Image (spheres, rainbow, N blue to C red):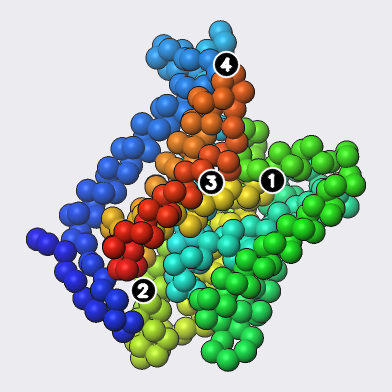
Amino acid sequence: MTAVTTKPLSGVAIVRRPTRVRLAWLALAFGVLVVLILLSISVGARGVSLEDMIAGLQGQADNLGQAAVLKRVPRTLLALIVGAALAVSGTMMQGVTRNPLADPGILGVNAGASLAVVVGIAFFGLWTASGFIWIAIMGATVAAIFVYLVGALGRGGATPLKLALAGAATAVALGAFVSAIVLPRNDIAGSVRSWQVGGVGGASFDTIGAVLPFLTVGLIVSWLSARRLNNLALGDDVATGLGERVAVARASAAVGAVLLCGAATAVAGPIAFVGLVVPHVCRLLVGVDHRWLVPFGAVVGAALVIAADVVGRVIARPGEIEVGIITALIGAPVFIHIVRRQKVREL
């Protein structure tokens, strides 16, 4: 069975991947994720033997190797759930806006969450994970609404180009506000700057337990919105003719995206490029059906962030480079390569 090519209303060819091809890619991605999880637990400033890894996973800490495993497990789990959340959030945003350049960073949602967290730290003494999550989600929501309202001004409403421009301008402005708050505050400047880079080095099971319910709800909402986004991709008029309530469909998908982005940013900082690059890669491999993009994007996003964390630990031994820097270095050339490929026209 071969891929079937059709022409949507936009006139751009879309390749529909056979189910067996999609399952094969999903299985391969999951296998790579498992290998990366094992590498993340075993690789770092100190190498870990197989025996120490097994003992550490069983909760033993009789030597330095086993103790290292106990520290790396929550770090790996946090990288996994944050990567999955950011990738799915980017997929939802691109589907809602019908903009292939949409991303939590480009649309200013990350910046809104970051500013809210910094305000909470600077003016309200906020330092708990649960407090970060709630205020980050609020900031992300306000930023998303503001960008949409600004992008909807003028003739034509909220076009993809206007949303991207409004989001980029908002992200720059909110970043300036963050700097204005942090620079005079030497008592919080160091910790805030480290958090702003984006990383999973401070992971703990308490942090994971605090953020996991929010990410779970966000993933469920995104999954339930997948079919609606497929209808929206056909155009608002066609979606309405199919019985879809366009405003409700967009709002539900946006809620899932903002929830995932806000919660992930709260615990790991504004990690860049995951929500932008991963959806493009997934579309090239499994097609444009959001019912496949959501789970596949979650697996690939988790693998990307874990891989970035491992690379950051290996190339800077005995120190480390934060995940946000590595994902930017990986994401920029990969995105340029995708744009230059002929297949990007199928997106």
Disc 4 marks a residue whose amino acid type is Ala
Q: Find the distance from the CA under tag 3 to the CA under tag 2.
A: 29 Å
* Dot label at residue 328: 3
Is residue 253 visible in this depiction of the protein? yes
Label 3: how many residues lie within 10 Å, few (<14), some (14-19) or many (20+)? some
Residue at 45% from the left image edge and 36% from the top image edge = 307
Picture quadrant where residue 9 is located:
bottom left
Disc nearer the start of the sequence (2/1):
1
Where 335 sits versus 46, above or below?
Answer: below
Amino acid type, label 2: Asn
Q: Which of labels 3 and 4 is toward the front?
A: 3
Say which of marks 1 and 4 sits in front: 1
Residue denoted by label 1: 196
Between marks 3 and 1 in the image, the one whose residue lies nearer the viewer = 3
**Is residue 154 depicted above or below 91 in this figure?**
below
Instruction: Please tell me whether residue 94 is drawn above or below residue 83 in the rendered image.
Output: below
Q: CA distance from mark 2 to mark 1?
A: 34 Å
Query: Is the Cβ of the residue at disc 3 closer than 8 Å to that at disc 2?
Result: no
